[in-house]
Image (cartoon, coloured by chain):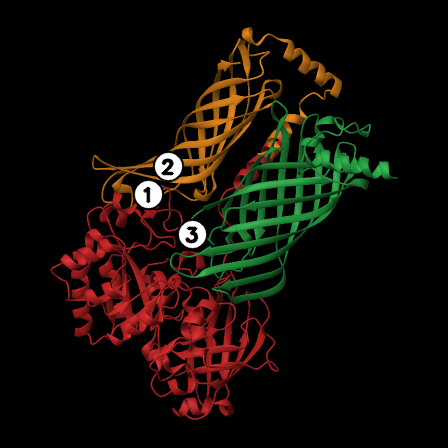
């Protein structure tokens, strides 16, 4: 009987599922920030945004590396990206009298590590300047960081440089609406909550995947099939095109319980609830090309009406989609991103040429695209060495690659903002 | 003295060529069972200088979420054991699926306790990976892994069951993209593995090796070519089957 | 799986080397032209297995489901090659219903019509088996073809997928007549990446198709 029990255990273990340690969910006490005045995203940005160096003498925590980039988000959150451990921080708070206080959480997406932190800016270290709306000086951020339920550790950050100023010419593009399920971000890839989270992770733009239901409704979903990787339950399996939209809306839930969004719902959230600057529609089913183009055109005009500066790009990943786009009556009425050859990008007058990174640094072709007035995005870069290699390429004083698609926007953001800084 | 050396050389050659010690006319220890020549994974001491080998296939399933779907990575799998004096033995493995190749070699000291044999040992593996993406980067990786291990084997009348517990100490990982180094040396305990192997007769005097390795590693060598940023310990399994030569 | 074979061999009688050689000599002296299952060295066996069992999901299989355990029938077949030792190798396939559920629209929020759901599978496994003293121990490794069926308003939606998995069984074989064995089996099937395990009580009928 012991042998049989061993067999059962082994069979279970010999399968393919890695039961990873659950991600710690920090509880953030918002008491300390009661009564604070949120930062001014106009005047305070110049003081807050920057590359901060960890003060090794005063800090007891070393897990975040030497450099941390800090950005004041349009929603007044303070977002920070560490150069070590693919770690992001999200803080909220503001000024009170002549100092500032923030509370928030951090997460290292390489593993389950997460925790909470409290951050203060003392009057003599920039707090007064922040409170008065000044723009002079360098801030010192004094943090108490907890890992899990562990004790508080000191982290002192001193601003030493400005953020890389190329951001106006560059997009940090998050794959699958912000991140994959494997990163265990608490929300599902390509879901509406993920789109709302994307900027906290460091992205300025998102790529979303568009597939078709059985009845031709464009939905935002990555895979051609339903598996336990993406959806809850055991009955919803196999080809996405086996199910109607109504069936999916009623019976299918993404891994964290969300409904599978339609393309229209996803674009609505991006336009109305985020400040994302670009959306790359990765068209995975050519049969609904016209329907996607129609939705894209409609949402682009809605964004214009709202004075929302967001670029919607119809992705052409293969010759099937290219052929259907060429034959579409809506050709030329929307912006297009072409993943095929530079000649194809020129032929359809694409706004962006997007080669895969495995093709290497194609300087000549990328320069040609720039000369024709097109942007060049590369996909999908997840390795720090590759990211730095592509970021280092420049043309006429600007990045040669004006956008990078990644599964780790936090990693890309941390490298992008600090690329010109040597610790 | 010279005669002794010649006998040893003949014994070694005979063993390598798969000829039995008895057939070579050499003395055989009284307590050694005839068919023990079939065992490759078992650390039980055999005739000196006897070489045992197996040829087969291994099938690793790359761990999720490093890969998004359970992804099989089959390899040609050759394993060997060379019996040495004083209960010592050399053992090793050669495996390749073109993208990833592994050469492993080491030694163990077998302590027989009736049908049970306990053996501490140590091996070193060199892993070489090479992939050229279509029209793109040539990516290579060279990796040295050390495996201190302890092995226990039970001898049945015709078969052998062995469990081997290994720690995985990665001493060096050097990655190159188009010849440019992208990763450097390191000394890290990256995980460990439990291997359970069964060696038994199958047909005629052919023996079969069946086994499974359950691996927990933060950096499994089979997935060297993935660029994911996971640092978690990931569980993976490798099933192997081989005909013992 | 390895432990399975070990358990088998632990229960096997211990023969001396001399006894083994004698046994082999006796076997070799038997005329193979008139070989029977008992004295032949090689056999090709067909195993037909049927029974009933329970399936356990690690999570409820649908957003409406309230239970994780279901009961259903299970049929399998194995074609095994059994050479002159304990171990035989072959292929296994079959069909089993993992779960079947019905939901009334009136009882579930968000459900517009009555709904019926079913998940079944066809395993395709490489199978290993040993049978000392008529006790059968086996294990399989391979894939499961998963079949999903959704029925609402008389319309049926079919879908399918493939999952990796394994199986293990233990049983006993009576031999009422030469070349035919019958006995009970306990069969475990595991699809770990789907969070599904099935344990079934089965009856196995085994026939030696070819004896040589």
The C terminus of chain B lies in which quarter of the figure?
top right
Q: Chain A, which colour? A: red
Identified at 85% across, 36% down, the residue is B3
Give the residue number, with chain letter if any, for mark 1: A238
Q: The residue marked by circle 2 belongs to what chain? A: C
Q: Quadrant of residue A218?
A: bottom left
Q: Chain C, which colour? A: orange
- Left or right: A321 as drawn, with respect to B239: left
Residue B130 picture location, percent across and down: 50, 55
Residue B225 badge:
none
Give the residue number, with chain letter if any, for mark 3: B68
Q: Are marks 1 and 2 in contact (CB under 8 Å)?
A: yes
Residue A396 picture location, percent across and down: 33, 81
Q: CA distance from mark 1 to mark 2?
A: 9 Å
Give the residue number, with chain letter if any, for mark 2: C146
Q: Chain B, which colour? A: green
Answer whether residue A34 is visible to the viewer in this image: no
Q: CA distance from mark 3 to mark 2?
A: 19 Å
């Amino acid at each position: 009987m012991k042998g049989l029990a061993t067999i059962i255990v082994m069979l279970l273990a010999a399968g393919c599922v890695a039961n990873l340690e659950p991600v710690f969910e920090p509880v953030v006490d918002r008491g300390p920030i009661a009564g604070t005045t949120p930062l001014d995203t106009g005047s305070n940005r110049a003081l807050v945004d920057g590359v901060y160096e960890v003060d090794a003498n005063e800090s007891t925590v070393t897990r975040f590396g030497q450099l941390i980039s800090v950005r004041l988000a349009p929603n007044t959150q303070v977002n920070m990206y560490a150069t070590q451990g693919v770690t992001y921080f999200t803080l909220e708070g503001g000024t009170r009298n002549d100092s500032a206080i923030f509370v928030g959480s951090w997460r290292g997406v390489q593993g389950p590590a997460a925790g909470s932190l409290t951050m203060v800016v003392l009057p003599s270290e920039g707090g007064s300047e922040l409170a008065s709306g000044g723009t002079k000086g360098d801030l010192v951020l004094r943090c108490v960081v907890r890992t899990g339920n562990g004790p508080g550790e000191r982290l002192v950050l001193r601003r030493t440089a400005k953020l890389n100023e190329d951001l106006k010419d560059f997009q940090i593009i998050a794959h699958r609406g912000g991140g994959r399920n494997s990163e265990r971000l608490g929300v599902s890839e390509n879901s509406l909550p993920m789109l709302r989270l994307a900027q906290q992770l460091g992205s300025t733009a998102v790529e979303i995947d568009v597939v078709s239901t059985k009845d031709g409704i464009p939905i935002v979903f990555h895979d051609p099939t339903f598996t336990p990787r993406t959806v809850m339950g055991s009955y919803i399996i196999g080809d996405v095109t086996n199910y109607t939209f109504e069936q999916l809306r009623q019976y299918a839930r993404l891994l964290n319980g969300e409904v599978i969004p339609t393309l229209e719902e996803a674009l609505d959230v991006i336009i109305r609830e985020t400040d994302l600057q670009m959306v790359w529609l990765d068209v995975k089913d050519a049969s609904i090309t016209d329907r996607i183009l129609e939705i894209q055109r409609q949402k682009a005009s809605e964004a214009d009406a709202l004075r929302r500066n967001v670029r919607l790009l119809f992705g052409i990943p293969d010759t099937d989609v290219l052929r259907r786009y060429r034959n579409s009556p809506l050709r030329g009425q929307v912006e297009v991103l072409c993943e095929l050859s530079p000649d194809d990008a020129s032929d359809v007058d694409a706004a962006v040429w997007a080669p895969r990174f495995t093709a290497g640094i194609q300087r000549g072709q990328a320069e040609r695209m720039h000369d024709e007035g097109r942007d060049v995005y590369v996909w999908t870069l997840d390795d720090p060495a590759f990211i730095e290699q592509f970021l280092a390429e420049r043309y006429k004083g600007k990045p040669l690659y004006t956008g990078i698609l990644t599964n780790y926007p936090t990693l890309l953001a941390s490298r992008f903002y600090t690329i010109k800084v040597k610790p | 003295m010279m005669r002794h050396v010649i006998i040893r050389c003949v014994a070694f050659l005979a063993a390598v060529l798969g000829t039995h010690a008895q057939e070579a006319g050499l003395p055989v220890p009284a307590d050694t069972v005839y068919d023990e020549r079939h065992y490759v994974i078992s650390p039980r001491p055999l005739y000196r200088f006897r070489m045992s080998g197996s040829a087969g296939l291994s099938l690793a399933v790359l761990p999720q979420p490093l890969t998004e779907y359970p992804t099989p990575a089959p390899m040609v799998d050759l394993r060997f054991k060379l019996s040495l004096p004083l209960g010592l033995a050399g053992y090793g493995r050669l495996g390749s699926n073109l993208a990833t190749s592994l050469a492993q070699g080491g030694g163990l000291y077998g302590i027989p306790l009736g049908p049970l044999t306990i053996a501490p040992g140590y091996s070193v593996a060199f892993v070489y990976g090479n992939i050229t993406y279509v029209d793109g980067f040539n990516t290579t990786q060279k990796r040295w892994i050390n495996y201190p291990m302890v092995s226990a084997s039970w001898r049945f009348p015709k078969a052998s069951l062995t469990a081997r517990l290994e720690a995985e100490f990665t001493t060096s990982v050097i990655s190159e993209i188009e010849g440019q180094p992208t990763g450097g040396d390191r000394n890290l305990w990256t995980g460990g593995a439990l291997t359970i192997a069964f060696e038994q007769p199958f047909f005629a005097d052919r023996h079969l090796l069946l086994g499974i390795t359950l691996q927990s590693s933060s950096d499994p060598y089979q997935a060297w070519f993935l660029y994911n940023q996971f640092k978690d310990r990931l569980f993976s399994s490798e099933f192997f089957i081989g005909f013992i030569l | 799986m390895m432990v399975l074979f070990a358990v088998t061999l632990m229960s096997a009688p211990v023969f001396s080397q001399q006894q083994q050689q004698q046994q082999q000599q006796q076997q070799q002296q038997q005329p193979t032209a008139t070989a029977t299952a008992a004295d032949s060295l090689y056999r090709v066996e067909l195993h037909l297995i049927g029974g009933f069992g329970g399936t356990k999901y690690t999570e409820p299989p649908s957003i409406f489901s309230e239970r994780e355990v279901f009961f259903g029938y299970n049929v399998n077949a194995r074609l095994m090659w059994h050479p002159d030792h304990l171990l035989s190798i072959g292929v296994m396939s079959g069909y089993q219903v993992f779960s079947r559920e019905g939901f009334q629209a009136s009882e579930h929020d968000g459900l517009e019509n009555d709904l019926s759901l079913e998940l079944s599978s066809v395993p395709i496994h490489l199978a290993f088996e040993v049978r000392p003293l008529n006790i059968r121990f086996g294990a399989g490794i391979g894939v499961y073809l998963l079949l999903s069926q959704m029925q609402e308003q008389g319309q049926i939606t079919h879908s399918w997928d493939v999952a990796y998995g394994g199986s293990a069984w233990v049983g006993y074989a009576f031999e009422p007549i030469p070349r035919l064995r019958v006995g009970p089996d306990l069969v475990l099937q595991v699809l770990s990446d789907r969070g599904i395990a099935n344990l079934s009580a089965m009856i196995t009928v085994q026939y030696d198709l070819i004896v040589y």
